[in-house]
Amino acid sequence: MKRTTVKPAVVTVLIADDDPIVRQAVRSVLDVSGGFRVVGEAEDGKMAAELVKETDPDILLLDLLMPNLPGLEALRVITTAGSEVRTVLLCSAISAKQILEALQLGARGVVLKKRVAELVPALDAVMRGQYWIESQSVSNVVQVVQQLAVATPQASQWQNRFGLTARETEVISFITQGCMNRDIAASLSITEETVKRHLTNIFNKVGMSNRLELALFAIEHGLVPK
Amino acid sequence: MAPQKSDEVRSVLEKVWLNSRPEALGRLATLESFSENLRSGTPDQLSWERALSAAHRLAGSLGMFGFNEASSCAAEIEALLLDGPTPDVAATVGLVERLGMLLEETQASSGEPERRGS
């Protein structure tokens, strides 16, 4: 029976990522680590959902951005179909909103590709019945979901109302904290030029003309706590 | 992860990178071709779609091999391209050139990821 906390001798894994280099790297890491057997590879979300049904793996490693069916939509299909596969998102970047949505859809963990060395500890934790979020094993997922829910609803409203991207919302959050462009660039690992470009787009979208106006507007409309 | 396992993982990723580097350079060439089209004022839908896919894949895979700065650069290019087939010319061209330099560095230092651009 699936969803037991007893780890089987060999954990079966399905890898779903549109990039063959990523699939090869993940397969190699699992092979060398021992105790895992890759039972299939999917290059898009639709194929992932089909292969979960066909191969019934213990673990699904699922990328977010894939052709045909994006990762979270594929997860929705898989969950709706009643599969008991434990899904771990393996992605380049993910927002708090996406983590929240993934957990609500039944995902058990998130591993960033740049932290692929954490993959095996993450899968071990998930196979023990725990969750793996932000580089650590988590037992109380309810608390994590509550924290993420508090952090994201206002941002979602803003994004919908003004057409702001997740990254633009992040930049606004830094602006309300009084951060300079170089600080924002360092925090987001982007260049100052890119920060300026984001700000120009934000000003155009929300109809503000400077940082102070933007910060006050953001606080007034509840994007960040007053 | 135990230190020995950690070393084995690093070693196997180095091998995968060495095998994958030509493919990564092919993706860079796709971006450079789009960048050139953009500079000459003749970007087209197909080359934009290919460039977007190349940037997305580079952003994901380079991070796995420890090339975090190159991965971030590719992610910035991807973000620019998501705006549409005619992104900011100077920004796109500059970032593609920078990515080329960062990938060039991986040749000299391949086999030892995680020591730069973190």
Image (spheres, coloured by chain):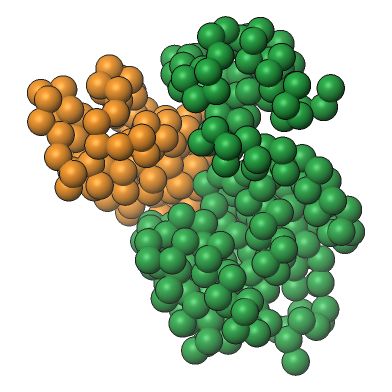
Chain colours: A green, B orange
Residue in the image at 84% along x and 51% along y: A146
Q: Position of residue A215 (x, y in %)?
A: 68, 15
In the image, taking residue B38 as reference, residue A60 lies left or right, namely right
Residue in the image at 72% along x and 42% along y: A152
For the N terminus of chain B, the image quarter is bottom right
Q: Position of residue A23 (x, y in %)?
A: 44, 63
Q: Is residue B55 visible?
A: yes
Q: Is residue B96 above or below residue A181?
A: below
Q: Position of residue A150 (x, y in %)?
A: 81, 43
Q: Nearer the viewer, residue B117 or B54?
A: B54
For the C terminus of chain B, the image quarter is top right
In the image, taking residue B32 as reference, residue A60 lies left or right, namely right
Residue in the image at 10% along x and 31% along y: B42
In the image, taking residue B21 as reference, residue A217 lies left or right, namely right
Name the quadrant containing residue A155.
Answer: top right
Q: Nearer the viewer, residue A26 or B89?
A: B89
Q: Nearer the viewer, residue B74 or B47?
A: B47
Number of marks in the rendered image:
0
Which residue appears farthest toward the bottom when viewing the image? Answer: A1
Q: Is residue A52 above or below residue B51?
A: below
Name the quadrant containing residue A90.
Answer: bottom right
Q: Is residue A121 above or below residue A96?
A: below
Q: Position of residue A4 (x, y in %)?
A: 80, 83
Q: Is residue A118 visible?
A: no
Residue in the image at 76% along x and 29% along y: A222
Q: Is residue A104 above or below residue A189?
A: below
